[in-house]
Amino acid sequence: KQEVTQIPAALSVPEGENLVLNCSFTDSAIYNLQWFRQDPGKGLTSLLLIQSSQREQTSGRLNASLDKSSGRSTLYIAASQPGDSATYLCAVPRGAQKLVFGQGTRLTINP
Amino acid sequence: NAGVTQTPKFQVLKTGQSMTLQCAQDMNHEYMSWYRQDPGMGLRLIHYSVGAGITDQGEVPNGYNVSRSTTEDFPLRLLSAAPSQTSVYFCASSSDWTGSNQPQHFGDGTRLSIL
């Protein structure tokens, strides 16, 4: 059974800091890993998708890495801004059309 | 480009009532899914479809019904609402299966309360 864990559940940092969010998964036989952002009362927005053959993906100030052998992914956010405050979720595919999600990390960037 | 549109945004039902949650996408995606999000349980797959006329059960299908008569629409029906179905429901779509290089696009959700 695939389990996805995100630690910490909540993180608060001052504006301008670089930060890392963590995601771990128990079964390393994955096709890809996605990072999502969820704002309060809103749906999920896909930030980055890393395929199993890739080590990294970058989009603007975001960089996601994937280490299948250790069952870990990290999302690096550079020069954090108050607008980055949201819940960040990671997910891996499992079976037919199913994504297994972590519980998320609630990020607060303080001005 | 609207993406994935869900209606209604909020709904309150009484136990035993039935209703349909609407989901429409304008991206010509073949793959569509319904998830529910509950505190402490995360997101769980209810039903999914890989194209018009093709649907299948996910992780928590009991009490829900789906059909897919067009590529654009994927409604979720609650047959007889129960308090345990109080949740936030999300519809998602993609141009390819979850193991591909194509991301999932989510709607803004329907917040459903069953009294």
Image: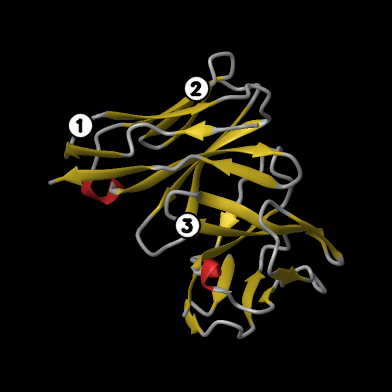
Q: Position of residue B41 (x, y in %)?
A: 49, 49
Give the secondary structure at mark 3: strand
Based on the displayed image, in which of its 4 quarters is residue B34 positioned? bottom right
Give the residue drawn at x 55%, y 68%. Answer: B85
Disc number lying in front (1 or 2): 2
Instruction: Tell me which chain the residue with mark 3 is part of.
Output: B
How dense is the environment of label 1, judged by Cα within 10 Å: few (below 14), some, or many (20 and up)? few
Drawn side of residue B73 relative to residue B92, left or right? right
Find the distance from the CA under tag 3 to the CA under tag 1: 31 Å
Disc number lying in front (3 or 2): 3
Give the residue drawn at x 62%, y 32%. Answer: A2
Give the residue drawn at x 73%, y 58%. Answer: B48
Label drawn at residue B84:
none
Drawn side of residue B108 relative to residue A94, left or right? left
Residue type (three-letter) at the residue carrying disc 3:
Asp
Find the distance from the CA under tag 1 to the CA under tag 2: 22 Å
Give the secondary structure at mark 1: loop
Give the secondary structure at mark 2: strand
Based on the displayed image, in which of its 4 quarters is residue B26 positioned? bottom right
Residue to which mark 1 is pinned: A17
Q: Is residue B1 visible?
A: no
Residue to which mark 3 is pinned: B38
Disc number lying in front (3 or 1): 3
Residue type (three-letter) at the residue carrying disc 2:
Arg
Question: In the depicted view, which residue is nearer to us: B48 or B57?
Answer: B57
Based on the displayed image, in which of its 4 quarters is residue A95 positioned? top right
Circles 3 and 1 on the same subunit: no
Q: Is residue A23 visible?
A: yes
Task: Tell me: residue A47, above or below residue B107.
Answer: above
In the current view of this chain or complex, which residue is farthest to the right? B53
Instruction: Tell me which chain the residue with mark 2 is part of.
Output: A
Residue to which mark 2 is pinned: A72
